[in-house]
Amino acid sequence: MKEATFGAGCFWCIEACFKDLKGVVSVEPGYAGGQTLNPSYEEVCKGNTGHAEVARIVFDEEVIRFEELLELFWFVHDPTQLNRQGNDIGTQYRSVIFYHDATQFEQASFYKQQLNDKGVWPLPVVTEICPISNYFPAEDYHRNYFELNPQNAYCQSVVRPKVEKFKKIFAEKLR
């Protein structure tokens, strides 16, 4: 098993999109990249811990490769927005790949360069590519948040449309 850790705005969206992929064993919302030890959601939301909201994905690389996860990562958010995703504003919502080994660093860097060289977006991709550091799991109530709270206003207006689009486009990759 391998791990990938991605920040792409709110971790509820990332988890909801990635958890049903073939080859994904688990997805855990958490916080990474900051200086505070074991921060709370409230501390991270204030934007002064340095952490990003992330999803840690455990996957079977014989079923789904890291490169495929990268493709999906760049699809589920706008990687040209610096320190935000839509109305979620702050460094905690930054686009970031926390790599777990040199191969992930090389693959993520190459893919990002290709996106910029080919002009896939009208603006440059600003996704950070950093070594994994200070990862802490989020509080239990964040796990399966979309599934357990489908009537939540944020889930209705932000998470649901993103998940529906993801599942439509990547249906062949779902369990």
Image: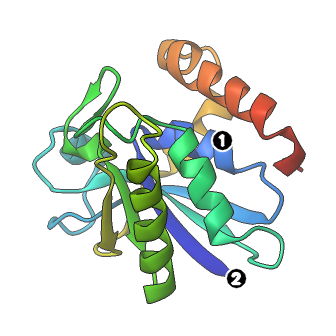
Measured as percent of width and height from the top left, residue 147 is found at: 69, 33
Q: Is residue 154 above or below residue 34?
A: above
Q: Secondary structure at mark 1?
A: helix
Q: Is residue 60 visible?
A: yes
Q: Tell me the distance, in whole angstroms, between the alpha carbons under discs 1 and 2.
A: 20 Å
Dot label at residue 1? 2
The residue lying toward the viewer, choosing from 42 and 72, is 72
Type of the residue with mark 1: Cys
Type of the residue with mark 2: Met
Q: Quadrant of the N terminus?
A: bottom right
Q: Is residue 149 above or below residue 95?
A: above
Measured as percent of width and height from the top left, residue 120 is found at: 47, 39
The residue lying toward the viewer, choosing from 168 and 108, is 108
Q: Is residue 4 above or below residue 166?
A: below
Of the numbered discs 1 and 2, the one sitting upstream in the chain is 2
Q: Residue furthest left?
A: 48
At label 1, counting other C-alpha atoms closer than 10 Å, the crowd grade (few under 14, some 14-19, many 20 or more) is many
Relative to 91, is 59 on the left or the right?
Answer: right
Classify residue 133 by image quadrant: bottom left
Dot label at residue 17? 1
Measured as percent of width and height from the top left, residue 172 is found at: 89, 45
Q: Is residue 27 visible?
A: no
- The residue that appears at 20% across and 63% down in the rendered structure is 34
Relative to 104, is 173 on the left or the right?
Answer: right
Classify residue 151 by image quadrant: top right
